Image: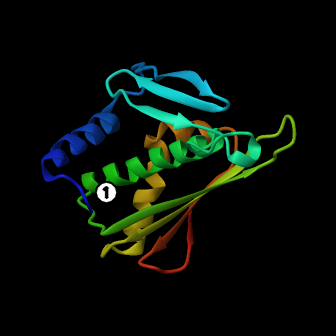
Amino acid sequence: MPMIPRMIPEVKETVRRRREQDPAEIARGAVRVDLRQIEQFTIEARTRGEHEQTFIIDEAVGRGGLGKGASPLGHFLGGAAACFMVWIIKLAVDADMPFDDLKVLARGRINRHVGGGFEAFTYTVQMTSPEPSEKVRALLAQVPEYCFVHSTLQKFLPMKVELELNGGPAVAID
């Protein structure tokens, strides 16, 4: 796994703090993103806080955009899947679980009618690891407890996770 060795203790500490946090303590935070129209449907988004970044959102050319960035739906699905993937990595580091390759294929089934929306998400986790399938599946089953985005979304729509380990067939994670 491509992890900077000096960062491993910090990642393990992050997982430990989250795991040991008293549920009775209210630990709240806020996330802020400021957006501004550049032209047409091209939008600059700037995250605020401890990790400030800028990214571009745009509609596809066929939808009136200029195609200068991923669509709002692409950012939404990609952000949700990235949160899930970050927690796979953190939990694997914490468990000293080696892996050589990790990909998440995220799909969102959507009703595109007025008043519609996402109806289900599916994440296919593709991983290469010497670890037994049962251990990897157990790790993946923990991720929804740690990923705030997944925890939020699963309250409103079906969230399916499946694992393709070492090029094998997809197996559902319960």
Q: Is residue 139 above or below residue 68?
A: below
Amino acid on which the number 1 mark rests in the picture = Ala
Task: Determine whether, in the image, residue 55 is placed left or right of residue 67.
Answer: left
Of residue 91 and residue 26, the one placed in the foreground of this image is 91
Of residue 56 and residue 39, the one placed in the foreground of this image is 39
Query: Which of the 4 quarters of the picture holds residue 106?
Result: bottom right
Residue at 47%, 35% (x, y): give it: 55
Estimate the x, y position of residue 18 in percent, counting from the top left.
33, 35
Q: Residue furthest bottom?
A: 168
Q: Is residue 18 above or below residue 103?
A: above
Estimate the x, y position of residue 59 in percent, counting from the top left.
67, 41
Estimate the x, y position of residue 131 in percent, counting from the top left.
32, 73
Query: Which of the 4 quarters of the picture holds residue 38?
Result: top right
Residue at 57%, 44% (x, y): give it: 70
Residue at 62%, 40% (x, y): give it: 153
Which image quarter is the C terminus in?
Answer: bottom right
- Write down the residue under mark 1: 92
Of residue 145 and residue 165, the one placed in the foreground of this image is 165
Circle 1 — which element? helix
Residue at 43%, 26% (x, y): give it: 47
Which image quarter is the N terminus in?
Answer: bottom left
Task: Determine whether, in the image, residue 26 is placed left or right of residue 152.
Answer: left
Q: Is residue 49 above or below residue 140?
A: above
